[in-house]
Image: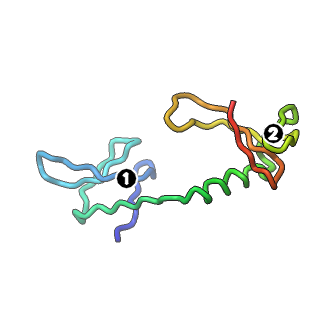
Amino acid sequence: MSAMKFCRECNNILYPKEEKDRRVLLYACRNCEHQEVADNNCVYRNEVHHPAAERTQVLQDVAADPTLPRNKDVRCAACGHGEAVFFQATARGEEGMTLFYVCCNLSCGNRWRE
């Protein structure tokens, strides 16, 4: 399997790009104009699928992260705990940023958004 390629100009990842008129496979940088001809015409695609339980564990681990801001003015609807960490992220299928809360009660892990 081929290794990832990086731009020699700006060190970003090079992505496969087809040049249809010359029928050539290129690797192109999406940050600058650098392109190079691929030495192999085979493109590998690696899709990582996470089980739902793994995603839930990641959010529960967020509650123990000391670098995230905490809010003691909220109350968890699931367990009644009075502290939650919060962060902003884009919600699936929505534009803009959403404020997410995760309960700091490690046995709860309830999450909600504002």
- Name which residue type carries label 1: Leu
Q: Position of residue 96 (x, y in %)?
A: 56, 28
Vertical order, 89 against 56 (above or below): above
Displayed quadrant of residue 24: bottom left
Which color scheme did the rendering employ for the protein?
rainbow
Name of the residue lying farthest toward the bottom: 1
Name of the residue lying farthest toward the front: 78
In the picture, the quarter occupied by the N terminus is: bottom left
Residue displayed at 63% across by 32% down:
98
- Name which residue type carries label 2: Cys
Q: Which residue is mark 1?
A: 14
Q: Position of residue 108 (x, y in %)?
A: 79, 51
The one of 35 and 42 positioned closer to us in this rendering: 42
User: Which numbered disc flags the more N-terminal residue, 1 or 2?
Assistant: 1
Distance, label 1 to label 2, CA atoms, is 44 Å
Label annotation for residue 93: none
Q: Which residue is mark 2?
A: 76
- Helix, strand or loop status at disc 2: loop
Does 73 sit left or right of 10 as displayed? right
Q: Position of residue 81 (x, y in %)?
A: 87, 42
Residue displayed at 22% across by 63% down:
41
- Helix, strand or loop status at disc 1: strand
Q: Are marks 1 and 2 in contact (CB under 8 Å)?
A: no
The one of 26 and 34 positioned closer to us in this rendering: 26
Q: 10 Å neighbourhood of mark 1: few (<14), some, or many (≥20)?
A: many
Vertical order, 72 against 34 (above or below): above
The one of 52 and 86 positioned closer to us in this rendering: 52
